[in-house]
Amino acid sequence: MGTCRRALLVAALLVIAAPGTRGQSAAPLNPADAKSFLGVWVIEMTEPAAFKGTHTIRVWDNSGTVAASLQTNPNFPAIEATGVHRDGNMLVLTLSHHAKPHPMQENGMPIWAVVSAVVDGDTMKVAQMLERSQTIKRGAGNRQN
């Protein structure tokens, strides 16, 4: 995929994730509207081959709103999503420079990330893009009991 197409994809994901776009309100996502996503998902990242690894995505009911986190390394705490949005059958998580307990980092610098997830049966399929990256990481996994 060319650099221009990647930039357009990132821009589209950011538009989807931005509150108030396309007539959506900035209201938090109701857990009833995200029921199929709730739980702990262990995702095996498989594409591209150089970025293989396991990510854990947690999606939960946080006092009546949907909250989510992403853990990319078991030696570090999960990073809470700063945005959780639903667009059709897709859940979009954003992790900004203000993510808690710390932002995602690359080479010691804070970066943002956009994660899109679709539940297909018992499997969550994920695509992740990081700031300053030309690579879309992909993977899939199952909900943990």
Image (tube, rainbow, N blue to C red):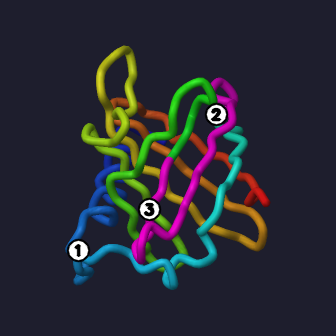
Q: Nearer the viewer, residue 89 or 98?
A: 98
Q: Nearer the viewer, residue 38 or 117?
A: 38
Q: Tell me the mark number nearer the camera, choosing from 3 and 2.
A: 3
**SS state under label 1:** loop
Residues packed near mark 1 inside 10 Å, few (<14), some (14 to 19) or many (20 plus): few
Residue at x-position 25% and y-position 41%: 98
Report which residue position mark 3 lands on: 67
Instruction: Give me the C-alpha separation between circle 3 and circle 2.
Output: 28 Å
Q: Tell me the mark number nearer the camera, choosing from 1 and 3.
A: 3
Amino acid carrying mark 2 in the image = Pro
Q: Nearer the viewer, residue 47 or 90?
A: 90
Q: Position of residue 19 (x, y in %)?
A: 23, 68
Task: Decide: is 2 above or below 61.
Answer: above
Amino acid carrying mark 3 in the image = Ala
**SS state under label 3:** strand
Report which residue position mark 1 lands on: 26
Report which residue position mark 2 lands on: 48
Residue at x-position 36% and y-position 46%: 95
Instruction: Give me the C-alpha separation between circle 1 and circle 3.
Output: 14 Å
Q: First in sequence: mark 2 or mark 1?
A: 1
